[in-house]
Image: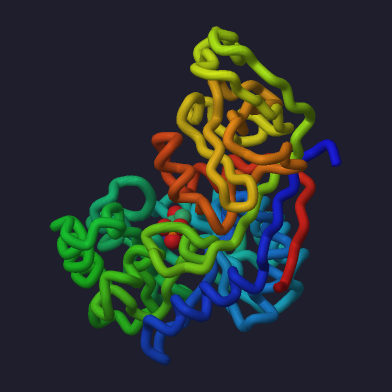
Amino acid sequence: MGSARLDINLNAIAENWRALDGKTGTGTETAAVVKADAYGLGSGPVARHLAAAGVRTFFVAVAEEGAAVRAAVGPGPAIGIFSGHMAGDTDLIAAHDLTPMLNSPAQMDRHLSALPGAAFGIQLDSGMNRLGMEPAEWEAVKARALEAKPWLVMSHLACADDPDHPQNAQQLAAFRGMTDGLGLRRSLSATGGILLGPDYHFDVTRPGVGLYGGLPFATALPVVQLTLPVVQCRDLLPGEPVGYSATWVAPRPSRIATVAAGYADGLLRSLSGKATLFAKGTPCPLAGRVSMDLLTIDISDLDEDPETLEILGPYQGIDALADAAGTIGYEILTSLSARYDRRYGTA
Ligand SMILES: *Cc1c(COP(=O)(O)O)cnc(C)c1O
């Protein structure tokens, strides 16, 4: 095999969804966020499997993603669009029965005039200042919105991965201030907010990264395994350099394995000199720079040449690799290459 193999465990995703669902009361529905192609893992297979596991509501970032999810899950589940009703989206929204989360009075005008009677939700800004209506905007359109019966009113927490951050309570109070007493279904929390406790749960939660095995859901089951084929191995004398810019020099008689994946496959160049790969559990350090399609690995301590080396899996999860790259698990996942040989398993 010439390309690296990415194993995606769909049952682990479903188990993570069940575990997050179990953290909230029976009155709280747990949706699933499958934006960015389900965080790089494939929104079609992931959404189909989650729908079979009982997910009734999906969220994506843009309407085009929603159309793909609708094709995968068929009629029935609700599909919310975080970016709302953008100019030019009307036909997609209508054709695929998507539910835009309206972010501004202008989006509300657009939606109610283009598709009167069609489902919509409202996104409010409770302090992140990224998406959603400001309190004064909401006040101005609230009566008209309520008359049209929103499906859901939501907001998003900026600091939920840090339970001690004072902005969590501030955003909770702001959200309550904008929505208490209106009789609307409400949603505030993604993965991090679920872990903040019941005050944050409301009627619907919207986990993403926790489904895919990432922090802040520390007890998530790992979902991905990435196995890189060895193209060739060679012996080096002490003092011989490896790779671009000769940043690694053999400190002893060394053996180097070259494996088939690089920064074009989402193995970020910031991993240069920092990543660790594994040969059946034995750690082997990356030697030198990450190339576009290749990595060079110091396998001097192995008894025999490996056929493959693992960079994601039981020995190293997405957040451990993210730490080495100076990023977050989300970016490791969403960078995973389309070039990988993807296998969906239900082990
Ligand atoms: C991405 C996103 C989520 C999911 O967040 P995670 O941290 O991955 O659980 C939920 N809601 C909104 C508005 C988002 O943008």
Q: In this view, does 214 lie above or below 255?
A: below
**Looking at the picture, does residue 322 appear above or below residue 237?**
below
Q: Name the residue: 76% across, 52% down.
A: 342
Front residue (pair 230, 319) = 230
Whole-percent x and y of residue 157? 30, 58
Counting from the top left corner in percent of width and height, residue 34 is at 58, 60
**Horizontal and vertical percent for residue 209?**
48, 59
- Looking at the image, which residue is at 16% across and 60% down? 164
User: Residue 269 appears at what percent x and percent y?
Assistant: 53, 26
Q: In which quarter of the image is ligand 1?
A: bottom left
Left or right of 7? Residue 126 is left
**Residue 135 visible here:** yes
Looking at the image, the residue that sits furthest to the bottom is: 26
**Can you tell which quarter of the image residue 289 is in?**
top right
Query: Can I make out residue 118 in this image?
Result: no
- Work out whether residue 127 or residue 19 is closer to the camera in this orientation and state it: 19
For the residue pair 238 and 216, the one nearer the viewer reads as 238
Where residue 204 sits, quadrant-wise, is bottom left
Looking at the rendered image, the quarter that the N terminus falls into is top right
Left of 280 or right of it: where is 229?
Answer: right
Count of numbered badges drawn on the protein = 0
Please give the name of the residue rendered at 56% of the width and 47% of the height, measured from the top-left corner.
282
